Image (cartoon, rainbow, N blue to C red):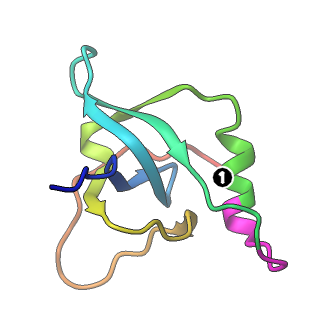
Amino acid sequence: MTKREAPIYKVIFLNQGQVYEMYAKQIYQSDLWGFLEVEEFVFGERTTVVVDPSEEKLKAQFDGVVRSFVPMHSIVRIDEVERMGTAKISEARQTGNVMPFPMPMPDK
């Protein structure tokens, strides 16, 4: 019997009109009603010469963050993955004929 490695989760959520795709080791329902706790963010190692600016922005934004509380209605999807991909931020675009649940958007 082999020991299974600790799972890695890909968390996709909406934040201020952008879609965040991040990887974490711990995810669970918070004691704060309506929030999900995301802990131990995982970012790619700097083993390659090519640097992804989107991942660097996320790494800087979440530097020193021990735990994030993400509102449940902002969660798009959570997957348990075998291998970690690249964390990224992209603009939220509505495609298709499905209307998302309304969320307050801050003025720019």
Residue 30, image x and y in percent? 27, 22
- The residue where tag 1 is placed is 58
Numbered range of the magenta stretch:
48-55
Q: Name the amino acid, label 1.
A: Leu
Look at 60% across and 55% down and name the residue there: 43
In the picture shown, does residue 12 fall above or below 68?
Answer: below
Please tell me which residue lies in front, 74 or 42: 42
Q: Quadrant of residue 94?
A: bottom left
Q: Nearer the viewer, residue 43 or 47?
A: 47
- Residue at 26 percent of width and 60 percent of height: 79
Q: Position of residue 96 (x, y in %)?
A: 23, 85
Please name the predominant secondary structure of the magenta segment in the image: loop
Of 102 and 38, nearer the camera is 38
Placement of the N terminus among the 4 image quadrants: bottom left
User: Residue 11, percent across and down?
Assistant: 37, 54
**Residue furthest toward the front?**
1
Extreme residue in the top direction: 31
Residue 13 horizontal side relative to residue 56, left or right: left
At label 1, counting other C-alpha atoms closer than 10 Å, the crowd grade (few under 14, some 14-19, many 20 or more) is some
Tell me, yes or no, whether the highlighted magenta stretch contains residue 35: no
Labels in figure, total: 1
Which residue appears at 25% of the width and 39% of the height?
A: 72
Residue 70 vs 8, above or below: the answer is: above
What is the x, y in percent for residue 37? 35, 30
